[in-house]
Image: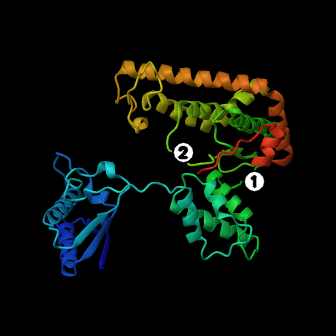
Amino acid sequence: MPFFSASASEFIEMIVGVGASRVRELFAEARKVAPSIIFIDEIDTIGRARGGGSGMGGHDEREQTLNQILTEMDGFSGSEGVIVIAATNRADVLDPALTRPGRFDRVVVVSPPDRGGREAILEIHTRQIPLAKDVNLAQVARTTPGMTGAELANLANEAALLAVKRKQSEVTQSDLSEALEKVQLGAERPLVMPEEERRRTAYHESGHALLGMLQPGADPVRKITIVPRGRALGVTLSTPDADKYAYTEEYLRGRIIGALGGMAAEQVVYGVITTGAENDLEQVTNIARGMVARWGMSERVGRLSALPSDAQQAYGLAAAPQTLDVIDDEMRRIVDECYDEAIRKLGDHRDQLDALAAALLENETLEETDAYRIAGVTRLFKEEP
């Protein structure tokens, strides 16, 4: 079947009317060789909701192009045999006329792949890469929840580059593991830290890891390192055993407690707070805001979506001032309760915290099995069905 592919940006020109003309030509060609398929990529370029104000230049051109697509699709009958498909990452901004019945009335949401999908995608992207016998793509798929096809392709390329740098003829499981670290955690950077700061970083990461191990329902700790990566002085990597699609209040509180573990460890051991917790606090704030204002997990705010998902941009315009004050109070209450819990747990398990920090100072990086053994915590496996 003939297939016509176009990007919506190809229709837009400075001269008004050119886009509409190109749309007419495209549909005329498709009708000549019907049955056929027309695919328009990034439809939001021309399909954004039309405003009431008068536009100039490119805005007029965009509206005329959109109107022409609407006109062409309105004239379709079942006997013409032309199927029109479009793709966008911003379905929320499309003009309602585009998505009404008779036009783009069927929406197919493409979510990130599940574990089986990730394994199949990895097999495709490693077809041209010689793999060693020890490579287990199912294991790689298990430890990459949430990654898209493009990210998995990048992972395979990074592993191949590592193997070439090491003058190997095949990509090993170790190459894939290190490539995953680079993609998720950032590249290693040479940085000579003073011994005292290195020791404090070891306690910071051990605090994250230990609370992640002790917290019921928390994501398992996969790796702890005090090797500087990206902008971080150290990293604790935690990923779930199975893909998660909905989160309980207990799980989210556990995430907050784990994120505050680094700051809490520095408080317990040194009695100080450093700037190393900046990224942790950003995570904590986003989770707490979601719990209170979007997911109905606060009795005082109630079962309301008090702030939209893009509240970071419009914070203060989305709700009444009194509601914003209540949201602020509730966020502080949740975070304070979680911080107190983090301090208490680390105080109760101080010997395990010391053991993890000492092992990190000696080895710099601890894998999952070693981390749980040193902390004296039994790892409970919950595999995906």
Q: Looking at numbered disc 2 in the image, what kind of residue is underneath it?
A: Lys
Q: Residues within 10 Å of mark 1 (few under 14, many from 20)?
A: few
The residue that mark 1 highlights is 190
Q: Which residue is mark 2?
A: 244
Residue under the point 21% across and 53% down: 100
The residue closer to the viewer here, 364 or 57, is 364
Quarter of image, res 177 = bottom right
Q: Secondary structure at mark 2?
A: loop
Q: Nearer the viewer, residue 31 or 280?
A: 31
| 235 lies left or right of 314 | right
| Residue 210 position (above or below residue 50) | above
Q: Residue extending furthest front?
A: 385
Q: Amino acid at mark 1?
A: Pro
Q: CA distance from mark 2 to mark 1?
A: 35 Å
Marks 2 & 1, CB-CB < 8 Å contact: no
Q: Residues within 10 Å of mark 2 (few under 14, many from 20)?
A: few
- The circle drawn on residue 371 is none
